[in-house]
Image (cartoon, rainbow, N blue to C red):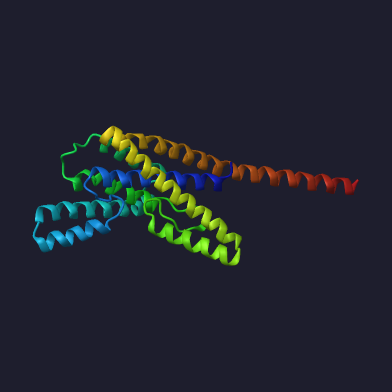
Amino acid sequence: MNKERYRFLIHYTLSFIGGYLGLYAIVSRADLFGNAQTANLLGVVRDLIGRDFPDMLLRVGALLIYMTAVILTVWIPEHVSTDLRFISIGIDIFAILLLGFLPSGMSPVVALYPVFFAMPFQWCTFKAPGGYNSSTIFSTNNLRQFTTAVTQFLMNKDTAQRDKAKFYGMTLLSFHAGAALSLILYMYRGLSGVWICLIPALYAVWLISADRNTAVDAPAVSRSTASSGSSLRNLSYKKKEA
């Protein structure tokens, strides 16, 4: 399997995780969406005007956690040589484990603190393959890109737009498949249903390892090919001399 293929599989797997944790947050924690800060920021404004300062402080805490995750994705590569992708998936795994242990009666905002940290870290760490601009934790832009690509392909029969539509279509499908499974498992297993998300997270670890190995092997293959070509040229040159 080539390197680019691994990158696409990583993207779809992370989209599945993003959808899984996104819907888990909605169904388990009073309709909060842990992948985004828009609703949380609006909640801060609402609490400020309504003078619900305790809840406002909890939401500000969620905001600071979100921002800290983004900051760390910039700081860590400058100071640590470890592949940031492994760190991100490690954070996802820790968050998934923790979420299943948190009591159902606690503040829904505080209960989603792990998601508020893990999802932006994932978002800033992984870049979409193929030169596309795609998030693994949101759907709005992916839906827009899919719709415009399908429209342009139907109008102009452009194969590039067809490939683009396939990519965004698969991203949307992965995200919402994760969301659907999250809801089903929550209905039957409650909060502990989130632990099933460990399976795609561990699969992502394997994919990243395979992607790294492919990147390491590629230069060796190139050097071997270059060496073989050089040997053939030298042999040809000696025959001419003879």
In the image, what residue occupies the spot 48% across and 53% down?
169
Q: Position of residue 86 (x, y in %)?
A: 40, 42
Q: Nearer the viewer, residue 112 or 120?
A: 112
Q: Position of residue 226 (x, y in %)?
A: 69, 47
How many labels, in total? 0
In the image, what residue occupies the spot 33% across and 51% down?
120
Quarter of the figure with the N terminus: top right
The answer to whether 234 appears left or right of 37 in the picture is right
Residue that sits furthest to the right in the current view:
242
The answer to whether 212 appears left or right of 232 in the picture is left
Q: Position of residue 181 (x, y in %)?
A: 37, 40
Q: Position of residue 77 (x, y in %)?
A: 39, 50
Residue that sits furthest to the bottom in the current view:
155
In the image, what residue occupies the spot 52% across and 60% down?
150
In the image, what residue occupies the spot 29% across and 32% down?
189
224 relative to 161, above or below = above
Quarter of the figure with the C terminus: top right
